[in-house]
Image: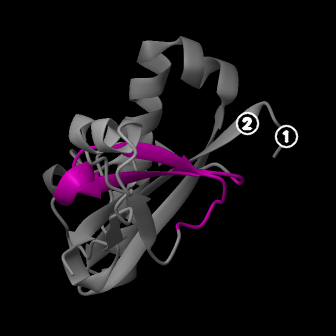
C-alpha cells in the first residue's frame, strides 16, 4: 500500500475473542468525499460481520455491527483519549502506531502556583496524573468511536 492508500480498521469482540478487519481505501476519497467515507465505513462493518459470522459458524445480527467504530490505522501515530481525572476528554497524538503502556501528564496547578512562583516562594513539586489503558469488552483495550485508544485516570 502506497501513501495514496489508507487502512481502515473495524473490530469487535465475539465469543470472547477479538475479531477485526482491515480495509484499504483511497486517501483522496476518504479525505474529501463524505459519501465515499460513509460507504467505506459501512463496507468495513459488513466485512467484519461476514468474517465474524463465518468464524463463529453462527448467524450474527447485522444490526449489532452497524454502530461499530471504524478508524484509519496509521503506521506512525495513534490517537489517545483521557477518561476521568484532571485531563478528562483531552486528546493527544502519540508518535507510534502502538499506544504507550501508561501516560504520565503534569497537572496544571492554576494561577495560584504561578503567582507564588512570581513572588519568589518555593515552587511546589509538579503533580502528575497517570493514565492507563481502559479495558473494554472481553478484556481488550477500549477505543473511542473514531478509534482513539481510551486511557483511564489512575488515582494514586
Tell me where residue 32 sits by quadrant.
top right
Question: Which sits in the foreground, 129 or 131?
Answer: 129
Q: Secondary structure at mark 2?
A: strand
Number of disc labels: 2
> What is the number of the mark on residue 147?
none
Residue extending furthest front?
Answer: 120
Which residue is at a point 67% across and 27% down the rendered structure image?
A: 27
- Residue at disc 1, secondary structure: loop
- Residue 16 shown left or right of residue 92 in the figure: left
Instruction: Specify few, some or many for label 2: CA neighbours under 10 Å numbering under 14, 14-19, or 20 or more.
Output: some
- Cα–Cα gap, marks 1 and 2: 6 Å
Question: Which residue is most to the right?
Answer: 2
Where is residue 88 shown, x and y percent of the image? 22, 49
Instruction: Residue 102: name its quadrant.
Output: bottom left
Residue 19 highlighted magenta (yes or no) = no
Which residue is located at x 43 percent, y 67 percent?
104
Q: Along the horizontal axis of the image, is 72 left or right of 55?
A: right
* Residue 43 as seen in the image, left or right of residue 16: right
Q: Can residue 153 be seen from the camera position used here? A: yes
**First to last magenta residue range:** 75-99
Residue 5, numbered label: 2
Q: Which residue is mark 1?
A: 2
* Residue 152, position as x, y percentages in the image: 25, 67
Q: Residue at x 25, y 35 (%)?
A: 111
Image quarter where the C terminus lies is: bottom left
Q: Are marks 1 and 2 in contact (CB under 8 Å)?
A: yes
Quarter of the view holding residue 127 = bottom left
Q: Is residue 45 above or below residue 119?
A: below
- Placement of 18 over or under 116, stated as above or below: below
Amino acid at each position: 500500500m502506497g501513501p495514496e492508500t489508507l487502512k481502515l480498521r473495524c473490530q469487535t469482540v465475539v465469543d470472547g475473542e477479538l475479531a477485526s478487519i482491515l480495509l484499504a481505501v483511497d486517501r483522496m476519497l476518504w479525505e474529501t468525499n463524505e459519501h465515499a467515507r460513509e460507504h467505506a465505513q459501512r463496507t468495513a462493518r459488513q466485512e467484519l460481520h461476514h468474517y465474524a459470522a463465518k468464524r463463529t459458524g453462527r448467524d450474527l445480527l447485522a444490526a449489532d455491527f452497524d454502530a461499530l467504530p471504524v478508524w484509519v490505522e496509521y503506521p506512525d501515530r495513534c490517537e489517545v483519549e483521557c477518561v476521568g481525572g484532571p485531563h478528562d476528554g483531552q486528546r493527544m497524538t502519540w508518535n507510534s502506531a502502538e499506544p504507550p503502556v501508561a501516560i504520565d501528564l503534569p497537572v496544571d496547578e492554576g494561577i495560584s502556583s504561578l503567582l507564588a512562583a512570581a513572588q519568589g516562594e518555593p515552587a511546589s513539586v509538579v503533580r502528575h496524573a497517570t493514565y492507563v489503558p481502559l479495558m473494554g469488552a472481553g478484556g481488550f483495550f477500549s477505543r473511542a468511536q473514531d478509534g482513539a485508544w481510551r486511557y483511564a485516570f489512575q488515582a494514586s
